Image (tube, helix red, strand yellow):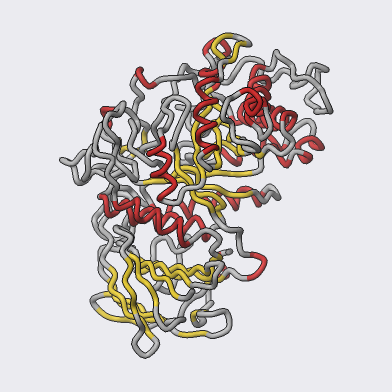
Amino acid sequence: MCRGQWIGLFILLMASGSVVRPLVAQSPPSPFRVYLPLVARQGPEAPPGVDFGLVFVTSAEWPADVARFERARQVGARWDRWPLYWSGVETSPGVYRWAHVDQALRDALAQGFEVSLILMGTPGFYAAGGIPGQLPIGGSVLRQSNGGTPRRAPTPPSLAIAAANPPAGLYAPIFTDGTDRPGPGKPINPNNRWAAFVYQAVARYRPGGLASQQVAGWPSGRGVRAWEIWNEPDLTFFWSGTATDYARLLKVAAIAARQADPQARILFGGLAIFEKPNWLREVLTALQNDPAPDLRDAFSWYFDVLPIHSYSYAWQTFRYLNQAKGTLQSFGLVKELWVNESGLPVWDDYPGPTWDPDSGYRGTKEEQAAYVVQSAAYAIWLGARVIFHFMLHDDCGNGPEHHDAFGLYRNTSPAPCHPSDAGARPAAAAYRLVAAHLPGAAPLWRWRSTQGQTDWGACTGQVEWFAFRRPDGARVLLAWTRLNVPATITVTAVASQGIVYDVRTGAATTVRPTNGVYTFSLPPATNYNTPTLCNPTRQKQGEAAVGGIPLFLVEGP
């Protein structure tokens, strides 16, 4: 939706697609009545249904047991995402050791999960300049405050696994005939180390690949089709090369992967955005100048999916996706969008810093549950196809000394870090709700209960509203406050009764309208631990980083 479609669009709420009814929202000190400025999605423009996933259900370094897979399945996750570290399998030049990846991937596929593997991490003997760097087995980009500037927590040596340097031979021809042009049976040039690795990985793990022939218990017909090319290449911590280097990395990977599996899907490396906000444009500019434009176009600019990462600030998920779509469109591109990392670590539960309620970029257990719902709503509205939460358990976060509690569940005991009782946090119930009610749901409308929008409405509006239509015809209505002020809202019913779900517990309460109208009270937003676009100094007023506990109303079948 362009900005102009917001302006002057004051119409009634579409309750069924043909019947229109009013809605009233009020917040202290004085009530107000407005007609909805409707931003609707209908017909063929509606995005496809969304799937939900978790980061690090399993991994080659920390393989999951049956109980861990079962927890992921119970909350509704269908996807698992984890890194396949190049340095972890090519232990010396040309020598590959796959056994640990074989086991973890076999088990994830056998448990019914789709898997997105991240190809990343240059072996030290192939590092070609740049700055020395090491990548963590687990962890995230936890935005910790350092004078208001985001930074990445240092990774302890015990978790280090690979370098961020571009690999040697990256610009060598992909094929042995001295070209980058694929053809039936053409062999990969071993001097292009990255091409050789990508080809080996995809040939092994595609459906019907080498692993299915060599690994006992490999599930028939199963394999990997989603290949992410590096993680957060727009962070120097992960990728020390230039945007042009990354464009080449992406090109080589796409061509080598499709040589091994013509149905391989290539994901651009998930974007952190905050350090290098123009990275996507810089990479696309490099690809625009590809010396073989016919090859670039034949390979759809060398990627099929553009993922973003978003933490701690719920509306940022909307902002990042919207910016990414705009950048793609400026190059004439339309790509599938994913959110393949999102989350809010908690401070008020072990192993979080329970002594620090103002801990930067964190929240309470209840705020984490609210974040799950809100970030998902923003992502689905912008058309995200897969949404990953970071992560199932706390694991080690950014390292055992950083008190990172990202998980839907606390760790088990024993565990490599922070052993605990494997207890569920409220966010597990919230995740279960969105995974149960929003797959396949079509966006109907989005609204903020204030006229006059600036910067896509980021700085205005007390109550955020979303309506989605499930495939069975039920309406899912989500609403929450954005400010530290409670609100009372009323909305016209579209059925004789509805169910309100508590996003913190999953408890269901049947509600019936009075004279065709529901009335609900929304608690104030309380999370000011993260700077926001409209509240950069974290004042406990104005826009909160996470809205208040959302209303989750389902009406219909």
Residue 164 visible, this angle? yes
Does 279 appear above or below 504? above
Of residues 81 and 274, the one drawn nearer to the viewer in this rendering: 81
Q: Quadrant of residue 195?
A: top right
Q: Residue furthest left?
A: 355
Does 428 appear above or below 199? below
**Quadrant assignment for the N terminus:** bottom right
Percent x, y for residue 296? 76, 37
Percent x, y for residue 324? 56, 48
Percent x, y for residue 349? 22, 43
Of residues 317 and 99, the one drawn nearer to the viewer in this rendering: 99
Which residue is found at the position 36% from the left and 69% from the top? 463
Does 430 appear above or below 343? below
Of residues 15 and 426, the one drawn nearer to the viewer in this rendering: 426
Residue 198 visible, this angle? no
Which residue is found at the position 66% from the left and 16% from the top? 169
Does 489 appear above or below 213? below
Image label count: 0
Q: Residue furthest bottom?
A: 515
Q: Quadrant of residue 215?
A: top right
Q: Quadrant of residue 501?
A: bottom left
- Relative side of 226 to 536, left or right: right
Which residue is found at the position 60% from the left and 41% from the top? 281
Percent x, y for residue 529? 27, 48
